[in-house]
Image (cartoon, helix red, strand yellow):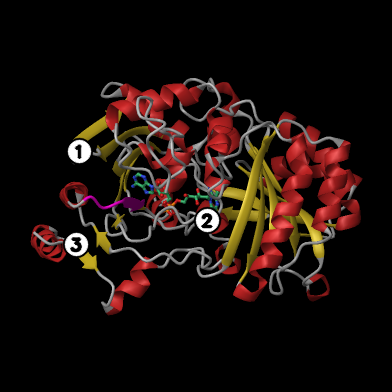
Amino acid sequence: MSLQEAIQEFRSQFRGTVHEPGNISYEEARRVYNAMIDRKPRLIAQCTDVADAMAAVRFARANDLRVSVRGGGHNAAGLGVCDDGLVIDLAPINYVRVDPSSRTVLVGAGCKWRDVDHATHAFGLAVPSGIVSSTGVAGLTLGGGLGHLTRKYGLTIDNLLSVDMVLADGSFVVANAEENPDLFWAIRGGGGNFGIVTSFLFEGQPVHTVCAGPMLWNLEDAPDVMKWYRKFITQAPEEMNGFFAMMTVPPGPPFPEELHLRKMCAIVWCYQGPMEEANNILGPIRSYRPPAFEFFVPMPFPMLQGMFDPILPPGLQWYWKADFFKELSDAAIEKHLEHASLLPTWQSTMHLYPVNGKVNRVSETDTAFSHRDAVWSGVIVGIDPDPANRERIVAWAKGYYEALHPFGAGGAYLNFMMEEGEDRIRATYRANYDRLAAVKAKYDPDNFFRINQNIRPAASRDASTVG
Ligand SMILES: Cc1cc2nc3c(=O)[nH]c(=O)nc-3n(C[C@H](O)[C@H](O)[C@H](O)COP(=O)(O)OP(=O)(O)OC[C@H]3O[C@@H](n4cnc5c(N)ncnc54)[C@H](O)[C@@H]3O)c2cc1C
């Protein structure tokens, strides 16, 4: 049977939509969040349910097609889409069901975080996630998941109870603490290496209204603010989260016009508690280095989650480099200042996300996510709408990264990496890598799922290739 005949047969068994080159819908379906990525798959299969995902895996196997798996399409390295192969796109599987009595949240693998935030907020609950609501639940969760609730409730995977999965042979399994616990261990940080997750069952946390928003300081104050922050954020109550940013002030409200497009530093806070308590906790920084501007107010949690969406729409050029950090030395702070003053475009930025509090209390071997002892996850992001600025934003991000990398803890959050090779992946998983490779050999021995931050199956490590 020719591939074209096989595609016809596949279409007849598949309930979702199949896009091929030449279809009007194909161009839209192959597009991902990062406009730097321009891949042309042979086929895109948008699954409506688990049966579709099983059919897609079997079809790819039978026709020897490489496969990428797509959740929200936000991966900056573009790992949700591939050239010439089959994209298994979960986007239509986008239900959220909240069970208020058990405080659990069942999420289809095609959801974005805004779908989850909307559904859970009505019940006074939230699932710890990231900071941009258009990010996919699937990729973010499988890599770990860092955001505004991390210090109090841990990584997203620390709130994951169970998953439904389709494996590389097209079979269906459940993975949780009782069923297939080795697989459940591996998918909590091990990315898309082990199969297609079709649904996630999370524990919801009691979060409704938070006191949140950014405080901004002039760049000259950045060294003093950073020195204060490095101590504060490891000792503050865990209800207080705050990520540090080097940034350019967006040219619009709520920022005053005189600050528009000025390079500054910021801390974006999220406090789970009353404003009076928050103000007491933040009093010392307000009197030590009064912010040039602040927008710190009580708000519904989904509002905070959507706060950065307008400045980060899909379709921008996007390049990032990352590292974990255990300390923020005076010498590192000098480098931060030097490179922040060179921010190449107004959307480009550097963030330091706290990886402390509850995250540190889970052991390094309890889940695949190894860097539990990090204090921050740093990411340097070059962003711009204009492809002509591509080289500029890449060069700036690389230069900043090279200056800070010597201060790193080894390894980086995989969800903040481009395709950077096996050494970086090993540095990230450290002692967990060999155990991950053994789980990979059990569930995906021929590395069928290899378009990801790839963990090679233990037995065939030398034979398989990435990409
Ligand atoms: C604007 C922006 C903000 C971000 N903010 C944060 C943040 O605050 N915190 C944070 O932790 N991360 C953040 N990230 C990083 C984000 O976690 C990763 O980009 C992640 O890969 C996005 O997941 P996705 O489902 O949208 O990606 P996709 O591109 O759809 O998929 C990425 C990879 O995940 C795997 N995958 C996806 N779906 C499945 C599935 N159903 N089953 C198995 N494997 C699957 C595959 O390997 C795939 O290649 C952000 C990214 C962007 C672009």
Mark toward the start of the polypeptide (3 vs 1): 3
Q: Amino acid at mark 2?
A: Ala
Residue 65 visible in image:
yes
In the displayed structure, would residue 99 be above or below residue 38? Answer: above
Q: Are marks 3 and 1 in contact (CB under 8 Å)?
A: no
**Magenta span of residues:** 64-69
Query: In the image, is residue 212 above or below residue 46?
Result: above
Q: Which amino acid type is shown beneath numbered disc 3?
A: Gly
Q: Which quadrant holds residue 382?
A: bottom right
| Circle nearer the viewer, 3 or 1 | 1
Residue 117, horizontal then vertical, whole percent = 44, 52
If you read the primary sequence from the N terminus, does the residue marked by circle 2 or circle 1 appear first? 2
Which residue corresponds to the image point at 71% horizontal and 60% vertical from the top-left?
395
Residue shown at the point (9%, 57%) measured from the top left: 13
Disc sitting over residue 16 in the figure: 3
Q: CA distance from mark 3 to mark 1?
A: 20 Å
